Amino acid sequence: MPDELRSHADRIVETLHRKGFKAYFAGGCVRDMLMGREPDDYDIVTDARPDEVAGLFEAVIPVGRDFGVVVVVIDRHHFEVATFRKEGEYLDGRHPSSVAFTDEEEDARRRDFTINGIFYEPVRKRYIDYVGGQEDILRGVIRSIGDPRERFREDRLRIIRGVRFAARFRFVIDRETEEAIRELAPLVSGVSAERIRDELIKILLDPYPHEGIRLLHTLDVLGVFLPEVSHMDGVEQPPEFHPEGDVLTHTLLMLELMRASPPGSYVEGEGSRDPSAALVMGILLHDIGKPPTMEVADRIRFNNHTSVGAEMAEGIMKRLRFSKKETQVVIDLVRDHLRFMECRNMRESTLKRFLTQENFGEHLELHRLDCLASHGDLSNYEFCREKLDELRAESPRQPRLLTGHDLIRLGFNPGPLYREILTYTEDLQLEGKIRTKEEAIEAVIERFRKGNKDSN
């Protein structure tokens, strides 16, 4: 697939060249090529106008002709082809008020960071660098093109993007660029929640998520859009349980271990895919309730921090416009992450429900990382894995022996008692105490029929 992608990108550039136009690769793909990384996609810039580009290829999507951008489609692959352009004043902190076509150098100088401002001409196999990006890659530096304050005011999301690039590549941020990030960090509050969410998830799924979050916090950016996480800094924990340090240190260590240690989890596709967005957000927010619940008596305690944290996590996930499904998974992860402490003492039916709940793989992985980043005791984790293996070796889980219709036929009126009866019979079924509908009916009559004043 990478070879195919590159071949199609070369074809687009060669087609433009044959027609007398300049055409280069631009942006992240060039940066990645210089760093020995395989590009995920290829963006192309040219002096051809959008209509001229559209006339050269069979499948073209006019996504932004007014801004000089079309998408060329080859074998279902999409390639953004943009005309060299300069941009007018940014009035909303995101979009330019106008676009004018220009030459390649001016196009390079309008971009965000030097490492993203390099062109590559595949026909002549040469790099074109007007902004010193190649030198900054060699030095390992993130530096804005031109005045960083101007670049960040144009598009406020660049403040977070600069941090993301620094963490992803383990580069340092140029002093003037760093000063501008600190100074203008409050501007992030004006960025849409969806754009912040997407950048945050990219940081959390990058190779060094702990460094990205730490750098956001150090540069006073994190507190603008996730003050609840910043507030974990300096919140001490009982050293006998958390020798690693405060709550933020513990959370960052979990993120580091997520990438550094073998997963060993029951997450689908174990070892072959990135963690889910819900899991990384669950890790980031799992102890979010500790700062507001901290008490110091006989020792440091965080009473009810899971329930408080779940409520806070719900607010954060909604604020950042996550989907309802992802939000619920994160709420469950935060609320239930201490339930593993009770697993050995659970009734058999409770344990089976716990182990077979939806998204349990994420729960188990969060617990594993929670243990590794603190006391290191994985005994409950191993216990749950053994029980899961046993459950998987058993026959598939059978449907409920009784339904609501069965209860009506037994003379029970619909109401809150239904859930209690169905849960009771399911517990007996999970524990192997009943196996047939007849046994379930007998158990219900024995326990509920005599005391059910609403029946008949």
Image: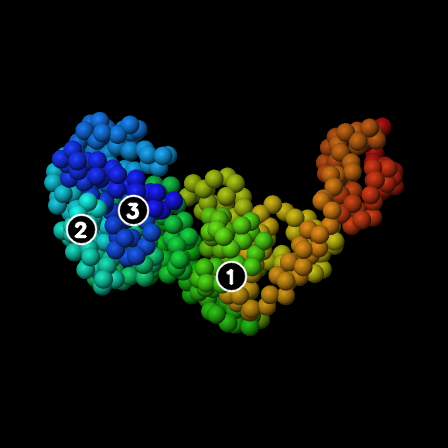
How far separated are the C-alphas under marks 2 and 1?
Answer: 40 Å
Badge 1 crowding class, 10 Å Cα cut-off, few under 14, some 14 to 19, many 20 or more, is few
Which quadrant of the structure image shows residue 6? Answer: top left
Badge 2 crowding class, 10 Å Cα cut-off, few under 14, some 14 to 19, many 20 or more, is few
Viewer-nearest of discs 2 and 1: 2
Residue 456: x and y in percent read 85, 28
2 and 1 marks in contact (CB < 8 Å): no
Badge 3 crowding class, 10 Å Cα cut-off, few under 14, some 14 to 19, many 20 or more, is many
Residue nearest the viewer, comparing 141 with 159: 141
At label 3, the amino acid type is Leu
Viewer-nearest of discs 3 and 1: 1
At label 2, the amino acid type is Arg
At label 1, the amino acid type is Pro
Q: Which residue in the protein does label 1 denote?
A: 262
Left or right for 20, reference 81: left
Looking at the rendered structure, the secondary structure element under dot 3 is loop
> Which is more N-terminal, label 3 or label 2?
2
How far separated are the C-alphas under marks 2 and 3?
Answer: 31 Å
Identify the residue shown where x is 54% and y is 53%. Answer: 270
Residue 339 vertical placement versus 441 (above, below)? below
Residue 103: x and y in percent read 11, 40
Residue 247: x and y in percent read 47, 63
Q: Identify the mark at residue 126; answer none if there is no mark.
A: 2
